[in-house]
Amino acid sequence: MQYLDEALKLDVRSLMAVAMKTGKQSAYSITLSCPTGQVICRDLRSSPDRVATVSITVNWPTKTGDPVSGGIFLTFRGWADRATEQTLYLSGTPAKVGGWLWRATCPETRQSVQALYLAPDGDRFLSRDATGLKYRRADPGAARYLRRCFKLAQKLKTDHFGPGIGKPRGMSDRTFDKLEWQLKKEHIRYLCAILKKTDPEFHDEDPVAPKRPPLSALRRAPRVNCSNYSRDKSGAIKLGARLETKFGTWTRDHK
């Protein structure tokens, strides 16, 4: 089974956003990086990107509000560094808030989609339905700890989590010791999540308070009338719950 994070992704909407920074033209030529690998944080991925050259032609309509047509010509190196070329049909429909909604046609299913994928060992970009790629079901706890590790490693300017991390130039000893200790703790938590072990308690952190049970699980006490007396529909006086428990049942007609 193949997963989406193992494939190269081509987002047509992002592609046209980059191309149209220079304004409305009939032809564009840009070079971009096709993202690959699992996203660790906003600016870091687990695998390097692949460079692709894109030539885009757009046929702008004469009337405002009409759809746009065009084509995308890709030149890239696929898996095993094979030089590949591919042509895609481009379409754009006017958006409600301005601009266009860009889509590309899948060569196999003929569906108009926003993103195309180059599956491992594939030779062209196709829609997700055509490639059969699946979403990876990851452990949310382990993924969260791993993202924290990579963010701390990025601050420390290192590519590993083990011992021997050098202090970056210009960083104070206090900041370095703090970040290094945080990285060690998050790495330990990540390993515990992978091994299905309980997180250890660290000396510089307060123990986690036990979670309170939900309100639905609590037994709600019945509401009791705590007043000294009350009247029924006929006007008779009745003792309140506390006095009735103390003195017994007692009623009296009050005129």
Image (cartoon, grey):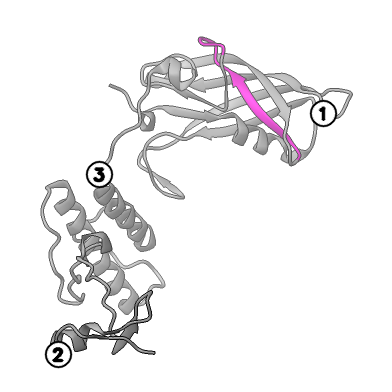
The residue to which callout 2 is attached is 247
Tell me the quarter of the picture where residue 56 sits: top right
Residue in front for this viewpoint, 171 or 200: 200
For the residues labelled 3 and 1, say whether their Cβ atoms are less than 8 Å apart: no
Label 2 vs 1, first from the N-terminus: 1
In this rendering, the answer to whether 246 lies above or below 73 is below
Which residue sits furthest right? 62
Q: Is residue 95 visible?
A: yes
- The residue at 42%/34% (across/down) is 36
Secondary structure category for the residue under label 1 = loop
Give the residue number, with chain letter if any, for mark 1.
Answer: 65
First along the sequence among labels 3 and 1: 1
What's drawn in magenta, residue-wise?
98-110
Asked if residue 247 lies left or right of residue 230, the reply is left
Q: Which residue is mark 3?
A: 139
Q: Residue at x 36, y 39 (%)?
A: 38
**In the image, residue 162 above or below residue 91:** below
* Residue at 76% over, 23% down: 68
Q: Which quadrant holds the C terminus?
A: bottom left
The residue carrying pointer 1 sits among few (fewer than 14), some (14 to 19) or many (20 or more) residues within 10 Å by Cα, namely few
Measured Cα–Cα span from mark 2 to mark 3: 63 Å
* Amino acid at circle 2: Phe
Q: Is residue 131 left or right of residue 225?
A: right
- Tell me residue 81's x, y (percent): 41, 21
Query: Amino acid type of disc 3?
Result: Asp
